[in-house]
Image: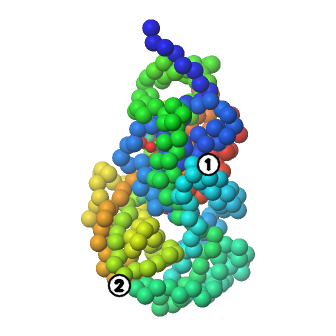
Amino acid sequence: MQKTESTEILIVGQGLAGTLLSYHLMKKDIAHKVIDVLKPGSASRVAAGLINPIVVKRVTKTWQADVFYPYAHQLYQELESFLNTRFYYPMLIHKLYGKDDAQFWQLRNEKEQLNTYISADASYDLPEGINNPFGYGTIKLSARLDISNMLDCYRQFLQRKDMIIEEELDDDEVEVSDGGIFWKGISARRIIFCRGSFDAHSRLFKHLKWNNTKGELLDVQVKGLELDSIVSKGVFVMPVGKQRFKIGATYAHHWQNLNATEAKLQELKEKWKVISSLQFTINRQLRGIRPTLSDRRPILTFLEDQPSVGIFNGLGSRGGLMAPYLAKEMLDQL
Ligand SMILES: Cc1cc2nc3c(=O)[nH]c(=O)nc-3n(C[C@H](O)[C@H](O)[C@H](O)COP(=O)(O)OP(=O)(O)OC[C@H]3O[C@@H](n4cnc5c(N)ncnc54)[C@H](O)[C@@H]3O)c2cc1C
């Protein structure tokens, strides 16, 4: 006879959403297990990890920035201490102005009172190799999150605690009843799906209006470029190692497959040329699918007709900023 194990919560997916939800559950001593296989296309594994509370193009705060940013800033540092590693690097973003941007930034700053977040101070010397004909504005509260490293370290913690099941979950093998759920010898009070874009293909969540986007970005080496901040103009360039950078990212609402495309490579090369005339060599062209709903808001809920089934998803293009606080909100719903 198969042995039955029981737990409070089963989390499916160990991307940003599943990881941060698990961390919050762990802090509250709520028994849970995480089911995950590393599937190609998972957003968290390719994301650049830019934490930016400002919409650069419109010079305005992102949705709930005043709540999400301080919470994320504190939680990532706390998680670094817990895992005894570094993956969160506060870093300025320099928005390279176009011809009329300086005035636009000033007007927006006055209107929206953004002094906590941005500054027009251009005293920082951008390194040689960065084209800067019209000056720049600075986003002060921003960071780079090395998401892959964070997820790897958290996964090792889960492995040590025997809390991760490295298997693909098939929805048809989940038995849902009023009192909870049952999957492959494990009974749980609730199951929470955090499968990012993959949840769009589940019969459980077909009723949601999905609008996922494919993103591509380049991991490159630029000989001679010493940059310790992120620069942005049409695209961002983020330092991730010695003369190594990420350039991205692109958006596509329709795509054939997960392959790297020539069209997006050309798009990124053209945008790079505006920022720098230096040559780069490509290490990798990364691709992933951003889990997005058509209202571009996250979803944290339990199904009305099956209250033991939950979903935490829709992190879109700003998962790094939003996930820490939203994971706590999901926990509050339990
Ligand atoms: C190119 C690109 C660049 C981006 N850049 C940024 C950025 O700079 N800053 C930022 O904040 N956000 C960025 N994002 C968005 C960010 O990546 C997402 O918001 C976030 O990672 C979504 O996390 P998630 O946990 O919801 O989904 P995912 O990361 O997709 O995680 C889902 C997990 O579930 C697993 N899984 C799926 N199906 C199953 C199954 N049946 N059984 C078991 N496991 C399963 C997957 O393998 C994966 O591990 C970017 C995204 C892309 C694509």
User: Going by the picture, which residue comes out furthest to the top?
Assistant: 1
Residue at the spot of label 1: 82
Compared to residue 279, the image places residue 175 above or below, namely: above
Q: Is residue 205 visible?
A: no
Disc 1 residue type (three-letter) = Phe
Q: Position of residue 103 (x, y in %)?
A: 61, 87
Q: Is mark 2 within 8 Å of ligand 1?
A: no
The quadrant the N terminus occupies is top left
Q: Residues within 10 Å of mark 2 (few under 14, many from 20)?
A: few
Q: Position of residue 92 (x, y in %)?
A: 57, 74
Residue found at x 40% / y 58%: 215
Asked if residue 204 lies left or right of residue 242, the reply is: right
Quadrant in the rendering for residue 283? bottom left
SS for dot 1: helix
Label annotation for residue 277: 2
Decide: is 84 above or below 166: below
The kind of residue on which mark 2 rests is: Ser
Residue at screen point 42% across, 48% down: 42
Q: Residue at x 56, y 38 (%)?
A: 311
